[in-house]
Amino acid sequence: AQSVTQLDSQVPVFEEAPVELRCNYSSSVSVYLFWYVQYPNQGLQLLLKYLSGSTLVKGINGFEAEFNKSQTSFHLRKPSVHISDTAEYFCAVSVPNFGNEKLTFGTGTRLTIIP
Amino acid sequence: DADVTQTPRNRITKTGKRIMLECSQTKGHDRMYWYRQDPGLGLQLIYYSFDVKDINKGEISDGYSVSRQAQAKFSLSLESAIPNQTALYFCATSDPNIRSNEQFFGPGTRLTVL
């Protein structure tokens, strides 16, 4: 079965500084990878996803992530953060299974932007 | 209008009470899911349904039941609520024609069991 590890439960970053949120997965087969964002008092919203092809994936709000198969990682990055990026970020993985894929989520990283 | 709606948004109840959380969607998706979110634990799958006649248990189904009344509606019930069921509950949908199982989430229901 697949699993996801988000190494940092909380990440404080100064406004306009770069940020990297780390995600590592475990799977014996190829995977699909996702980053979701949860703003305060809201549901989860898809930031970006990797299905195949280019390992650098661009998402909404200036975020991007890079799939690294050898390191089984899918870290999320943004070159310059804003106050509005304050949220909780979840990495998730699913395994291709003929339409029966299920998502497995990491435990989340709370990103706090310091003015 | 929101594509996935949940009612109620907040609920406080007492131990032993029966509670129903409702989810409706206008996305036309066949697949629907119920998750609970606890601080530091991420999202855990409670039940999922791939169509109206299909119901499956997830990782943590004990103490919960579901009903898929129509393609657009999926309800979660706590037959006899207990305090450790205090959590944020999310409904989600997905389209089986889109590979990867990308899911679309409702705004959540915050449930407190006293």
Image (cartoon, rainbow, N blue to C red):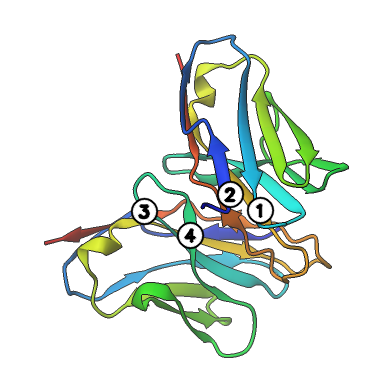
SS assignment at label 1:
strand
Q: Amino acid at mark 1?
A: Thr
Question: Residue sitting at 33 percent across and 72 percent down?
Answer: A20
Q: Which of pointers 4 and 2 indicates the residue nearer the eye?
A: 2
Q: Please tell me whether residue B100 is drawn above or below residue B68 in the rendered image.
A: below
Q: Which mark is residue A39?
A: 3
Q: Residues within 10 Å of mark 2 (few under 14, many from 20)?
A: many
**Residue wearing tag 1:** B93
Task: Indicate the chain on which mark 4 is placed.
Answer: A
Residue position marked by numbered label 4 in the rendering: A45
Could you say where residue B67 lies in the image, as x and y percent from the top left? 76, 32
Q: Do the residues indicated by labels 3 and 4 lie within the same chain of the protein?
A: yes
Give percent across and percent down for residue B45: 64, 44
Distance CA(mark 2)–CA(mark 3): 16 Å
Report, in whole angstroms, how far the alpha carbon at label 1 lies from the one at label 3. Answer: 19 Å
Q: Residue at x 80, y 60 (%)?
A: A100
Q: Are marks 1 and 2 in contact (CB under 8 Å)?
A: yes
Say which residue appears at 55% left-offset and 39% top-offset.
B6
